[in-house]
Amino acid sequence: MQPDQEIINRWSGSAPYWEKHREIIRQMFAPVTEALIAGAQIESGQTVLDVATGPGEPALSVAKWVGPEGKVHGIDPIPDMVAAARRAASHLNVKNVQFDVAFADQLPFQADTFDAAISRFGVMFFPSPGDGVREILRVLKPGRKLTLAVWHLAERNPFHYVLSRVVDRYVESPPLAPDALDAFRFANPGKLLEIFKQVGTAAPAERLLKFDIEAQVPIEDFYTLRLEMSDKLRGKIAKLSDQERKEVKREALASLSEYNTPQGFRFPAEVFIVSGEKRV
């Protein structure tokens, strides 16, 4: 299967769930959105590109930031994600945003169009990250910034590992290839930064963002949310018997309780914010 088709098949099944949980996902990753806005030096009135926008975030949040004089274009290769993003924009009455179906390495924009470009947890799934970064740089204005967010190591992010460690006790999980299309593809320090350097990005920089993922939902609702967000977890759960699923849920809820507070869930999290400029 071609990488492009693999991505479409994989994420099309997740689109309804990401739309269902869009608001809570927006809240959980708001600190990452804020870091992207700061890293890309996004200001009121600018035209901004959001790559791999999913059901519309962080594009919709950025649209509020740039104001009515600004414009945000969100692109995603999954038609169902783009349809969800358009529905969200209509529901929220956000007028200064546009969503289109496109891959990062085949952008439907002229060169030197955007004042800033961002992507939150998207580059890990680019079939060719170097080509994607190079294409995003093409549509940036000279001297302007591209800023991407990627997960640090899995063991630093209990939001991911609390459930995956439980499920993996029941389903065999062979190790992934180093460059597999996976959330932790760029988890090692400097790996994505090196791609920025290879494609000729000016002033490449990487910083580690430490923050809390917060979700004000009941524990069983959070368990459902995490399973529905992850095609990988859903696929593994589907292989289990009814009794095994009950055991997984019991063990997972016990593990999740460590992060449950009176104000809701709170997970310490670590993400790399990687930035670079288009050469003048």
Image (cartoon, helix red, strand yellow):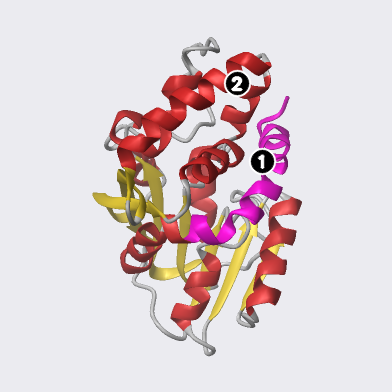
Q: In the figure, residue 155 lies in which quadrant? A: top left
Quadrant in the picture for the N terminus: top right
Q: Which residues are magenta?
A: 1-26
Task: Give left or right: position of 201 versus 112.
Answer: left
Q: Amino acid at mark 1?
A: Trp
Q: Position of residue 262 (x, y in %)?
A: 32, 53
Give the answer, above or below, for where 148 lies relative to 35.
Answer: above
Q: Quadrant of residue 21?
A: bottom right
Q: Are marks 2 and 1 in contact (CB under 8 Å)?
A: no
Neighbour class for label 2 at 10 Å: few (<14), some, many (≥20)? some
| Rendered image: mark on residue 245 | 2
Is residue 50 visible to us here?
A: yes
Q: Tell me: residue 208, above or below residue 56.
A: above
Q: Report the mark closest to the observer, 2 or 1.
A: 2
Q: Is residue 9 magenta?
A: yes
Point 50% across, 55% down: residue:
25
Residue at the image position 70 percent from the left and 60 percent from the top: 84
Q: Main secondary structure of the magenta part?
A: helix
Q: Residue furthest bottom?
A: 69
Task: Measuring from the top left, give residue 49's x and y in whole percent.
Answer: 53, 66
Q: Is residue 15 left or right of residue 42?
A: right
Quadrant (top left/top right/bottom left/bottom right) for the C terminus: bottom left
User: Which of the 4 image quarters holds residue 242?
Assistant: top right
Q: Nearer the viewer, residue 1 or 261?
A: 261
Relative to residue 91, is residue 8 depicted above or below?
above
User: Nearer the N terminus, badge 2 or badge 1?
Assistant: 1
Q: Which residue is mark 1?
A: 11
| Position of residue 69 measured from the top left corner of the image (x, y, whole percent) | 52, 90
Residue 241 position in % (x across, y down):
67, 14
Frontmost residue, 229 versus 40 = 229
43 or 10, nearer to the observer: 10
